[in-house]
Amino acid sequence: MLPAALLALTAVCAAQPAYRSADPEIARLISEMNAGRVARGMEKLGSFGTRDVHSATDSATEGIGAARRWLVEELKGYGPRLEVRTDSYRVKKQGRVQRDLEMVNVVAVLPGTTQKERQVILGAHYDSLSLARDTGPAARPAPGVSDNASGVAAVLEAARVMSRREWKKTLVFILFAGEEQGLFGARLHADSLLKEKTAVDAVLNLDIIGDETAGNGRKMSHLVRLFSAGPDDSPSRSAASRRCASPNRTRTTPISTRPPVVAQASGAPMLGRGKSGYDAELRWSHQPEPDLAGFAVVIRPTTAPFWEHEIFAGNVPRFTLANVSIDDLVIGVKAVSTAGHESPVAAYVAPERADGKIQLAEDVR
Ligand SMILES: [Zn+2]
């Protein structure tokens, strides 16, 4: 049951400016993606026979080494603005890693313009695995066209098309090794990002994409599964939930704008009951950005899984809902650019209580 004040908001929302109209530049970008190139990339990757991390690294035509060298050359061919490199890690025998070996990620960096220090990462694992148990892992065929030449070919095509343009943030296209052994390539890369204190705004990882038929023959063509780390309202969930797909309409908004901040470093709450003590008042802070149009507040009852109301608040640092209890609602806010691009939602999540220790009298007799 929605509070009456919220029901009244529905009309307000309908009257909001249509800042969400599709950006023609994004439509153009998508139209430049070539499905034929993606298909040929998948075939090429399958032609190496296997990309198992234990497979040959010295052959020109077979195994993970040959596949990796092809990936490097392919990315280099997209133009001089992409900085292509390999990151190599010496990994000891452990778990599914059957001997000491080298795991090599292929990385292509497209430096950003005004926010060069912030990264958006698009990745996919290029290694493969056969579950057949008859021969050694290096010899088993594992063309891995679905898992995961499909994701790799899509990353390559995105790198090709996106590297023809300039972007505010630095885009990193990365092809990971050792995923099948337990996300080794991705984890090693994440460790190095943490060590260098790199600011990463979003990571999109593609795995087994574009096939509507499951291994058991079941078909599903109207859904794209998005996996994101919880809990609800985490930055990861928020970034994922902005990509809604439906049979008639797919809406995607680029991650170009930084989300507002609704929690102070001091931990002081930025959601309160306002001056009256009976309102819901959300405050936020935001770094200045030249193309900022304002902020949209999103609201749902605490019992609802999805945002139900959205209100464009304008370029202001706070928003008040009169006569609404903050105990009944989840409230978030997102930044909206002049082109209609939205940041992920920053939802207000009550900080964990940090109660002090209760002092007991030593002797209560
Ligand atoms: Zn996979």
Image: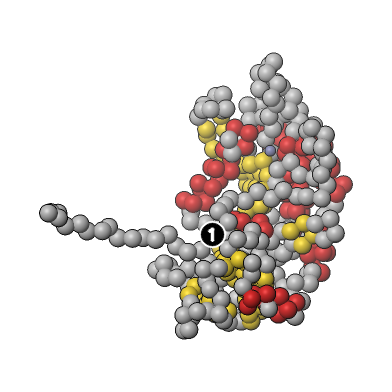
Q: Which residue is pictured at 46% across the width and 80% down the height?
A: 277
Q: Give above or below for 124 relative to 131.
A: below
Q: Give above or below for 317 relative to 43.
A: below
Q: Secondary structure at mark 1?
A: strand
Residue 210 appears in which quarter of the rendering?
top right
Point out residue 272 in the picture as x, y percentages from the top left corner.
Answer: 48, 75
Residue 250 appears in which quarter of the rendering?
bottom right
Give the residue type that dot 1 points to: Ala
Label 1 belongs to which residue? 199
Left or right of 31 on screen, residue 244: left
Relative to the observer, which residue lies in front, 119 or 11?
11
Point out residue 101 in the picture as x, y percentages from the top left corner.
Answer: 56, 29
> Is residue 350 visible from the viewing direction of this image?
yes
Relative to the observer, which residue lies in front, 135 or 113?
135
Q: Which residue is pictured at 66% across the width and 26% down the height?
A: 55
Q: Which residue is pictured at 85% across the width and 59% down the height?
A: 248
Q: Residue furthest right?
A: 36
